[in-house]
Amino acid sequence: MQRLAVIDDDLAVRQALLWLLESPSLGVSGYDSGEAFLADAAAANFNCLIVDLRMGGMSGIMLLEKLAAWDYCPPVLMLTAHGDVPHAVAAFKLGVVDFLEKPFDDQHLLQLVETCLQQDSAARERFARRRQVADALQTLTEREREVMQHILAGLLNKQIAEELAISMKTVEVHRARVFDKMGVKSAVELAGLIGILDGKGGKA
């Protein structure tokens, strides 16, 4: 089951959203402040967040700034009772999917939530893949990293041996270990895998 959090200090709005969004496939939790949300140990497990802009204590923008420091933040929809262009611009810069004024159209909100949930599914897959690649990189020795960088630069084994002042046999051994640890069979696959880390390869 996917999970959604509603973070709004207006009890009536919070309860209305919980009623509107709760379904057999979507669990919805409500929080009356950004502080209460961040205090929940399970906060990072939500697949979508609906955040009110103006709340007592931590504002919606302040909460977004906190979430920006997370390794992974799910898609966020922001609500406000007042049209505020500067705040909307700030919210979009912090990655908000959409900015809705109260009162909002229920069907439009439901469509946006569905879009956010789909985005979260794809984004989590990319995040997990990046983490997998990063973890694999951590297993490489310093020399293996040097050989890998030369492989990615398109150098042949002979050229790498000359650059690093080592034998071709040693280069071949390191090359084989790099491929094995990274789970690839060619330099092209290796380049695609590394590209995942900077958003240039795979689904990243």
Image (cartoon, grey):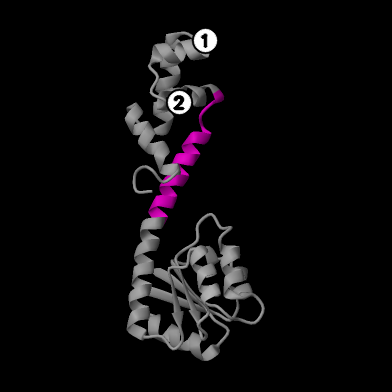
The residue at the far top in this view is 167
The residue that disc 1 covers is 165
Question: Height in image: 125 above or below 101?
Answer: above
Residue drawn at 47 percent across, 8 percent down: 167
Task: Give the residue at x 52% y 10%.
Answer: 165
Q: x, y (%) of residue 182?
A: 41, 33
Q: Does the magenta stretch include residue 107?
A: no
The numbered mark at residue 6 is none
Q: 19 or 79, which is in the foreground?
A: 79
**Residue positioned 36% across, 85% down in the render:** 106
To which quarter of the image does residue 158 belong?
A: top left
Q: Can residue 2 be seen in this view?
A: yes
Tally the marks: 2
x and y percent of residue 46 in the render?
47, 67
Tell me which segment is drawn in magenta. Answer: 124-142
Quadrant of residue 108 in the image? bottom left
Residue at the far front: name it.
85
Query: Can residue 25 be seen by looking at this rendering?
Result: no
Which quadrant, please, contains the N terminus?
A: bottom left
Give the vertical position of 21 relative to 74 (above or below): below
Q: What element carries label 2?
A: helix
Residue on which disc 2 sits:
148
- Residue type at numbered disc 1: Ala
